[in-house]
Amino acid sequence: AQKVTQAQTEISVVEKEDVTLDCVYETRDTTYYLFWYKQPPSGELVFLIRRNSFDEQNEISGRYSWNFQKSTSSFNFTITASQVVDSAVYFCALSGRNYGGSQGNLIFGKGTKLSVKP
Amino acid sequence: DTEVTQTPKHLVMGMTNKKSLKCEQHMGHRAMYWYKQKAKKPPELMFVYSYEKLSINESVPSRFSPECPNSSLLNLHLHALQPEDSALYLCASSQALGAYGYTFGSGTRLTVV
């Protein structure tokens, strides 16, 4: 079975606080990719990061950082010094199989709604 | 051009109407997808089109019909929809099937009245 769990439904922080969004995944594939997407109220899904299963190095991009731990099947996302513009729904996703049985599907978690207040 | 373009952005249609959603990409991607997203839910895959092969989520009703005129275009034909079909419809593309990055369009907000 392939599954992504984002246990935090909603998080509210005050601007400049650090916030971590949790993501836990399940898959039997030995090679897979993990993604984070941001969805602002306008609706489009904005790609943030893709990480393959063989690369456990943490990554930092500006105020964003990601912690991938295969041992705990987690791929957590931290925003440092949050800003109001970070307010959005954040989805963690796992590459998976489509209905034809081949690769070609993104399996999304339920999303975490982040509200950053001024 | 690194975009996936979806038209229209908003659509209101009656249950007896026939309409089409359009999706276009010029990144040379060989796989295209339709996702449906209900309010406060994650996107769910409806169809995948890659190398002239269509893969279907069998839970999708036949009133949704995909069409791929060429490798850059993926349309979604709508007929006799129900109010519960109201949702955000997202198109995406990737270089190929597999774990490549997915580029999403901005979506079409569909309301069925």
Image (cartoon, rainbow, N blue to C red):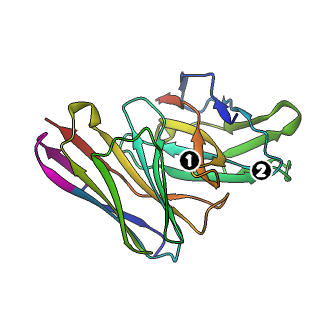
For label 2, the crowd category at 10 Å Cα-Cα, with few meaning under 14, some 14 to 19 and many 20 or more, is: some
Q: Quadrant of the N terminus of chain B?
A: bottom left
- Residue at image position (63%, 22%) is A7
Query: In the image, is A55 to the left or to the right of A77?
Result: right
- Residue B100 in the image, given as x and y percentages of width and height: 65, 61
Q: Mark 2 lies on which chain?
A: A
The kind of residue on which mark 1 rests is: Tyr
Q: Which chain carries label 1?
A: A
* Callout 1: SS: loop
Q: Name the residue under label 1.
A: A99
Closest to the camera, between mark 2 and mark 1, is 1
**Is residue B17 found inside the magenta-colored segment of the image?**
yes
Label number found at residue A59: 2
**Distance between the Cα atoms at labels 2 and 1?**
32 Å
**Which contiguous range is marked in magenta?**
B9-19
Q: Is residue A41 above or below residue B27?
A: above
State the residue in front, B40 or B58.
B58
